[in-house]
Amino acid sequence: MTVAVLGSALLLLAAPAAPVEVRFVTLAQGSASGLRQPLRTVVRTAAQWAALWKEHGGTVEPPPPRPPVDFRRDAVIVVALGPRPTAGWAVEITRVDRLPAETVVHVRQRRPAPDALTAQVLTQPYHFVRVPRPRGAVRFRDEPETAPNRAVH
């Protein structure tokens, strides 16, 4: 019986830890950004945040105020698609999971439906969220698209 109990205990110790969902706060989300390249990153310092926000808001006059972040305890996760040829594109951080060795950021992109009426304008979809400072590596995981975006823009 002792062997069975020890074996069960070892199996429990060897089992992977379940992810813990991390609460996050959206700082900015939309379709017009000065970020001209696709980007997935974690901003961990005030200097990085100031530079990124300046680039992001560079196309708007006056530039939007930068949301405050306490980088002693938080970080900013950034997902930007880069230029898209029409309206109807979107990106969303849907979930953030903490595991013992990494943080996983779940990302969903939406594209306009093939038959959607969309404005013929360049867009740059983005989503910035504040999270408790991640430990270890941060990995981005794409989720399958839901139905194409049929909204008329």
Image (cartoon, rainbow, N blue to C red):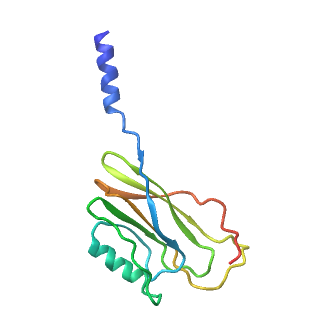
Q: Residue 80 vs residue 74: left or right?
A: right
- The quarter of the picture where the N terminus appears is top left
- Residue 11: image location, x then y, percent: 34, 27
Q: Residue furthest top?
A: 1
Residue at the spot 68% in from the left edge and 70% down from the top edge = 113
Displayed quadrant of residue 123:
bottom right
In the displayed structure, 19 sits above or below 44; it is above
In the picture, residue 18 is in which quadrant? top left
Q: Count the marks.
A: 0
Rendering coords of residue 107 (x, y %): 49, 60
In screen coordinates, is 97 left or right of 3? right
Is residue 30 among the parts visible in the rendering? yes
Find residue 60 and report its horizontal and vertical position in percent. Answer: 47, 87
The reply to whether residue 126 is in sight is no
| Residue at x-position 37% and y-position 67% | 41
Residue at horizontal 36 percent and vertical 33 percent from the top:
15
Q: Residue furthest bottom?
A: 61
Q: Position of residue 138 (x, y in %)?
A: 35, 58
**Residue sitting at 34 percent across and 67 percent down?**
69
- Decide if residue 147 is on the left or right side of residue 18: right
Quadrant containing the C terminus in the rendered view: bottom right
